[in-house]
């Protein structure tokens, strides 16, 4: 915990953070807690980055994150500043955690209780309950080691990972085994495989290209469980904003950074839409491709266009925010429509890189849990279809998929929805690019492949500009809200180390 008695006040410096997503809010809070004057720039009129909210006609929509996993990461951040999550919002554990839909009358509710989950597995595949316990024990070990020490390394050199604890565990971490092969050593039933592999499809790469290390996500989702902050993720953003302001951070909304003024290999001034600011150091918590390519001269960039073109991106998404003027039966809070071929959709995203022919998709209905996010008697629906980054989207393309997805939701629920929509907004690749300067309109950063993990990710420290560091989903540790929170802390520590604070 930071307080006035333990701040390191060698010298108060002027520092800038660009981007007010979770990594930017985290980084600015840690920097300011050390007694520095921190200015946080945000190009949009609302902070939170991809976790912004959209409100209209009495509906409150989370525009990005909707799965609250790894609660220990959030709690660790709050505890550093003398808070706990309960100071800001009420957390509830969803039961069922989520539902997987395989067909009209074929859906599986995933229970919050682990023993009930084991029984569910056993009912689907004989002998799988004990296998699940073994699988989850290994996943928990990976989670404990990774989240306890490995994830806080800045990934600058291989030496960070050559420690006794890591070397003795290297084989148990399964960095060099594929997630697909690992899962199939335990389970055979296609439904169980879909249940275990869905986080990889939605957040990463093909299961065969993803290290088995990432079974730690199964521990987070299936053993720790799926939580929900009442009021939505906007409440979490508000909590982080409050903490930043408590530390003295100056938050400048609607104030996009346009360039850096550099002298002797250092940023000496940040130039934004509304003025200039002298600075001793900068953390780029916006998309790091944008920070490099749009705010630096070519000679000052760490990575070439060729480098970025060779990166494997995690999916982007086509989103619909829908306000329905009636309640919809047969939906839970989180619903995964896996009523088409998972391998075919994964191939369309990661290999063919084309619009999917028969997509899988996700429907969030937070109004099933939280009456605050929709008017009385109404339903709040958030629909997400993973797609390849870099595609060209158009109004006609969006409407085609809207009709396709709505028809499948109507068929499953037995509810007529289309004529009851009183609020509708779509969001896709061009919006991610325009609002967040997201490289190729990505939604989730880089895919979690072996050669894009740890030291193989874009470096946190600029190779050409001495006092420029990066945070966020394109660098260490990777995509997702908990990694973004950690990324901000690591970047802040690296900048402070550079400044010898």
Image (cartoon, helix red, strand yellow):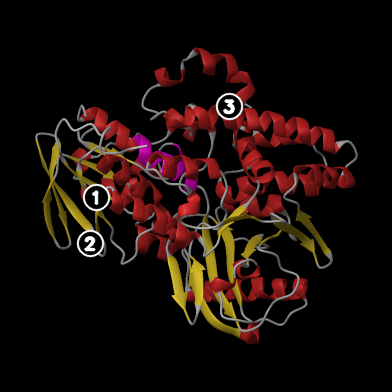
Q: Residue at x 46, y 20 (%)?
A: 161
Front-lying residue, 174 or 389: 174
- Per the rendering, the mark at residue 175 is 3
- In this rendering, does residue 312 appear at all? no
- First of labels 3, 2 by sequence position: 3
Q: Which mark is residue 248?
A: 1
- For the C terminus, the quadrant is top left
Q: Residue at x 58, y 29 (%)?
A: 144
Is 494 above or below relative to 336? above
Task: Identify the magenta region.
Answer: 477-490
Give the mark nearer the N terminus: 2 vs 1: 1
Mark 3–mark 1 distance (CA, rounded to whole Å):
41 Å
* Real-space CA distance between mark 2 and mark 1, rounded to the nearest whole angstrom: 18 Å
From the image, state whether disc 2 or disc 1 is nearer to you. 1
Report the residue that reaches farthest toward the left.
263
Image quadrant where one finds the N terminus: top left
**Residue 465 in the image: x percent, y percent?**
20, 36
Q: Which mark is residue 255?
A: 2
Q: Who is closer to the viewer here, 72 or 387?
A: 72
Q: Is residue 370 magenta?
A: no
- How many residues crowd around disc 3 within 10 Å: few (fewer than 14), some, or many (20 or more)? some
């Amino acid at each position: 915990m930071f307080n006035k008695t333990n701040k390191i006040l060698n010298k108060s410096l002027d520092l800038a953070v660009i981007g007010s997503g979770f990594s930017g809010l985290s980084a600015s809070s840690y920097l300011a807690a050390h007694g520095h004057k921190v200015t946080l720039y945000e190009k949009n009129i609302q902070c939170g980055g991809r976790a912004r909210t959209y409100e209209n006609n009495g509906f409150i929509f989370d525009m990005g994150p909707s799965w609250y996993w790894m609660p220990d990461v959030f709690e660790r951040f709050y505890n550093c500043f003398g808070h706990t999550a309960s100071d800001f919002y009420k957390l509830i554990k969803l039961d069922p955690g989520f539902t997987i839909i395989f067909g009209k009358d074929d859906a599986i509710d995933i229970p919050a209780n682990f023993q009930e989950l084991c029984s569910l597995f056993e009912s689907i595949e004989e002998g799988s309950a004990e296998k699940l316990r073994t699988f989850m024990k290994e996943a928990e070990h990976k989670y404990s080691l990774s989240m306890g020490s490995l994830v806080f390394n800045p990934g600058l050199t291989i030496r960070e990972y050559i420690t006794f604890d890591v070397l003795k565990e290297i084989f148990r971490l399964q960095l060099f085994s594929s997630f697909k092969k690992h899962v199939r050593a335990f389970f055979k039933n296609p439904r169980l495989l879909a249940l275990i592999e869905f986080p990889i499809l939605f957040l990463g790469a093909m299961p065969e290209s993803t290290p088995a290390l990432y079974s730690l996500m199964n521990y987070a989702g299936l053993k720790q469980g799926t939580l929900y902050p009442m009021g939505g993720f906007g409440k979490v953003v508000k909590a982080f904003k409050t903490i930043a302001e408590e530390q003295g951070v100056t938050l400048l909304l609607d104030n996009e950074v346009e360039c850096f003024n550099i002298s002797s290999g250092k940023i000496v001034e940040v130039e934004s839409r509304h003025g200039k600011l002298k600075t001793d150091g900068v953390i780029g918590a916006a998309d790091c491709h944008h920070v490099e390519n749009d705010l630096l001269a070519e000679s000052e960039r760490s990575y070439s266009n060729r480098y970025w073109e060779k990166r494997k991106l995690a999916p982007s998404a086509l989103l619909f925010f829908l306000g329905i003027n009636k309640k919809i039966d047969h939906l839970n809070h989180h619903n995964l429509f896996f009523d088409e071929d998972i391998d075919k959709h994964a191939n369309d995203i990661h290999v063919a890189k084309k619009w999917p022919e028969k997509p899988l998709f996700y429907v969030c209905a937070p109004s099933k849990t939280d009456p605050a996010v929709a008017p009385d008697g109404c339903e709040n629906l958030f629909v997400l279809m993973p797609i390849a980054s870099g595609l060209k989207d158009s109004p006609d393309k969006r409407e085609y998929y809207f009709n396709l997805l709505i028809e499948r939701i109507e068929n499953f629920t037995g509810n007529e929805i289309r004529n009851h929509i009183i609020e509708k907004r779509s969001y896709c690749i061009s919006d991610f690019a325009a609002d967040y300067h997201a490289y190729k309109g990505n939604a989730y950063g880089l895919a979690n492949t072996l050669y894009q993990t740890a030291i193989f990710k874009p470096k946190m420290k600029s190779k050409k500009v001495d006092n420029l560091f990066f945070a966020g989903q394109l660098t260490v540790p990777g995509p997702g809200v908990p990694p973004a929170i950690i990324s901000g802390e690591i970047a802040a520590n690296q900048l402070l180390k550079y400044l010898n604070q």
